[in-house]
Image (cartoon, rainbow, N blue to C red):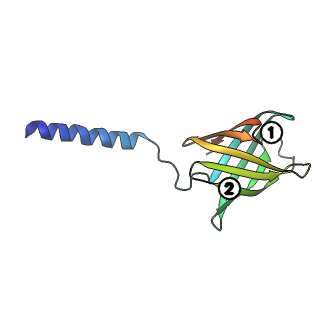
Amino acid sequence: MRKASIIFAALFLGIAFQGFSQSAAPADFFAGKWEINLSGTPAGDVKWTTNLVRKDGKLTGELSDATDAAKPKRVINKIDETADEIVIFFTSSQGDEIPLALTKTTINTLEGRLMDSFDANAKRLK
């Protein structure tokens, strides 16, 4: 009986320690402030910030140039969302709708592609 108690106590402590040592993912994972980096675009490397907000059940927001606040913001037309991925659609300066697909990699990072052509990654801002 004593061995069973020791094994049970060790198992319980192991599970408790594992549970407390990990950060919990936010309840609304994609909502919040993000810094998005795009690599190798025709305009060079690009850095945007966005604050994704849920309104009427859907995510919305704007893309702002992180290096030049004077540049016009890009309105996000729509966001398609699954449990592990979002696709942000915005209009280019030429009037084309551009998709930016981002997939969860950790609780604070995303990776993906802009137009299936350019590498993208994002990190959660605090």
Q: Circle 2 sits on which residue? A: 80
At a point 37% along the width and 43% down the height, the residue shown is: 19
Q: Please state if 68 lies on the left or on the right of 102 as rendered.
A: right
Instruction: Tell me: 81 left or right of 41.
Output: left
Could you say whether the residue bearing mark 1 is in a helix, strand or loop?
A: loop
From the viewer's perspective, is 118 left or right of 71?
left
Q: Residue furthest right?
A: 94
In which quadrant will I find the N terminus?
top left
Mark 2 vs mark 1, CA separation in Å: 27 Å
- In this view, the residue in front, 67 or 46, is 46
Q: How many marks?
A: 2
Specify whether 67 is left or right of 85: right
Q: Which class describes the residues within 10 Å of circle 1: few (<14), some (14-19), or many (20+)?
A: few
Tell me the amino acid under the disc marked 1.
Answer: Thr
Badge number at residue 67 = 1
Residue 68's spot in the image, x, y percent? Answer: 83, 42
Looking at the picture, which amino acid does disc 2 mark?
Answer: Asp
